[in-house]
Image (spheres, helix red, strand yellow):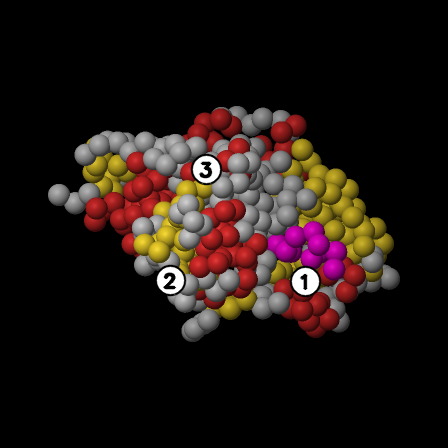
Amino acid sequence: MLEKIHVFHTNDLHSHFKYWPRMQSHVKEMRTKLTNMGETSYLFDVGDHLDRSNIYTEATVGKGNVKLLNEAGYDVVTIGNNEGITLSHEELYHLYDGAAFDVVVANVNASHGTNPAWMKPYVVLTTAYGTKIAVIAATAMFEIYYKELNWEIDEARNSLIHLAYQLRKEVDIIVCLSHLGITEDELLAEECPEIDVIFGSHTHHVLPNGKLINGVLLTGGGKFGQYTGHLVLEYDKKMRKIVEKEDFLIHNKDLPTVKNEHEIVQFLEDEGKRLLDKPVFTTEKSYNKEWFHYSQLSDLFARAILEKSGADCALFNAGIFLDGLPKGTVTALDLHRIFPHPINLCTIELSVAEMKEIFQQSKNEEWPYIELKGLGFRGVIFGKMLTYGFSMNEDRQLLINGKLADNDRIYKLVTLDLFTFGYFYPSFKYAKKKYILPEFLRNIMIDYGQRFFKH
């Protein structure tokens, strides 16, 4: 007997809800039809469903996303880095308390005490005809972040291969939710043909009909709710093996609109605004933002991050300010609009020679006009690199807070974590550093503002 099994899958939604109502409606309709035909179907999400640059996600600290996943009837999800490292330990620990689906991630564990009840290394699903499907999963290894947030993260590929071999004799089919990126998926397929399908994500790759490597089918559904994937497996019960597997992508924008679609999406935004529209401090004047110059807001921000970090000097790009700070009552919604980025601070220890090099690199005339995408940046353009507390005089000597730097000293620079990944300042990647977690830039500004603007 040939059994058809369907898996609908999404990845890297990043809280882009524009097509969510129609996608949810389409999948529910399809799954009802398949059930009536006697065919089993599932719905998976491969991580980064939430993104705190979205005000509904921010206001509900991700619980709103879990509610949407529940309503859509998801069966299994895994966590991406947006779930894993943009929430505090406590927030992630309780994120899925109300989940009506299984959450699978094999390579994350609590550093102290017990794991949350929802955290499972794998689950086994059984179809209407008794076929057993193991779902294993792993997430991208941002080790330093997880460690700071009191989570241990294991090597992903090793964890998955170990599980696949362990489960192979117990189940008929093994599928993997991989929030690791296309390169890791390809390596996993080469090393572990025991896995039948790897649902891909993280690198936002698009594989319109999947990709077969070493007999393993890889999928990739882009980002931001552009696509819903549909995997079809044909399983021969007598031979106990998959005889056909194919994956294709559904363009969500081309799906039929649903009744009140705009109102449903607008409600999420309005609810986020309502929850965030709470006063946090009061200013006596407005603070302007500039993308190509120093500004009143950049001066204020520099003071806030220097105080928070205890660093000697600061470095950041002016493009992080999406708006100015208004005069009068300032709300959490205002701060989210100015700083929507899931970006953290990081302190880096540098010698005088390294500080000089950083100062010179920061004068790159092309950087201000870059339309930066990714690395947590949710702005428009990069903007001018701003330096606070360090400069160079005419004799090319380094000054720290107006005084000649001591060549025997190591100085502490506070900057944004996006600069530590090696794209702009390669030396930062290997320097001694400490990430300041879990606070985002907006949280640091709120804390500072509540002290600075006290009357």
From the viewer's side, name the closer residue of 238 and 444: 444
From the viewer's side, name the closer residue of 279 and 360: 360
Q: Position of residue 190 (x, y in %)?
A: 79, 61
Quadrant in which residue 136 is drawn: bottom right
Q: Position of residue 15 (x, y in %)?
A: 50, 41
**Res. 28 mark:** none
- Residue at image point 29% right, 54% down: 307
Left or right of 302 on screen, residue 198: right
Among the two numbered marks 1 and 2 on one chain, the one whose residue lies closer to the N terminus: 1
The vertical placement of 368 against 375, above or below, is above
Name the quadrant of the N terminus: bottom right
**Res. 406 mark:** 2
From the viewer's side, name the closer residue of 450 and 406: 406
Do residues under tags 1 and 3 come within 8 Å of each other at their CB atoms? Answer: no
The vertical placement of 264 against 188, above or below, is above
Do residues under tags 1 and 2 come within 8 Å of each other at their CB atoms? Answer: no
Report how far apart the C-alphas of labels 1 and 2 lie in the structure.
60 Å
Left or right of 85 on screen, residue 226: right
Quadrant in which residue 33 is drawn: top right
Type of residue at label 3?
Lys
Left or right of 110 on screen, residue 163: right
The part of the chain drawn in magenta is 178-187
Q: Residues within 10 Å of mark 2 (few under 14, many from 20)?
A: few
- The residue wearing badge 3 is 384
Quadrant in which residue 312 is drawn: bottom left
Q: Position of residue 37 (x, y in %)?
A: 73, 43
Report how far apart the C-alphas of labels 2 and 3 lie in the structure.
28 Å
- The residue wearing badge 1 is 134
Residue most extreme to the front:
395
Among the two numbered marks 2 and 3 on one chain, the one whose residue lies closer to the N terminus: 3
- Residue at image point 13% right, 43% down: 455
Q: Residues within 10 Å of mark 1 (few under 14, many from 20)?
A: many
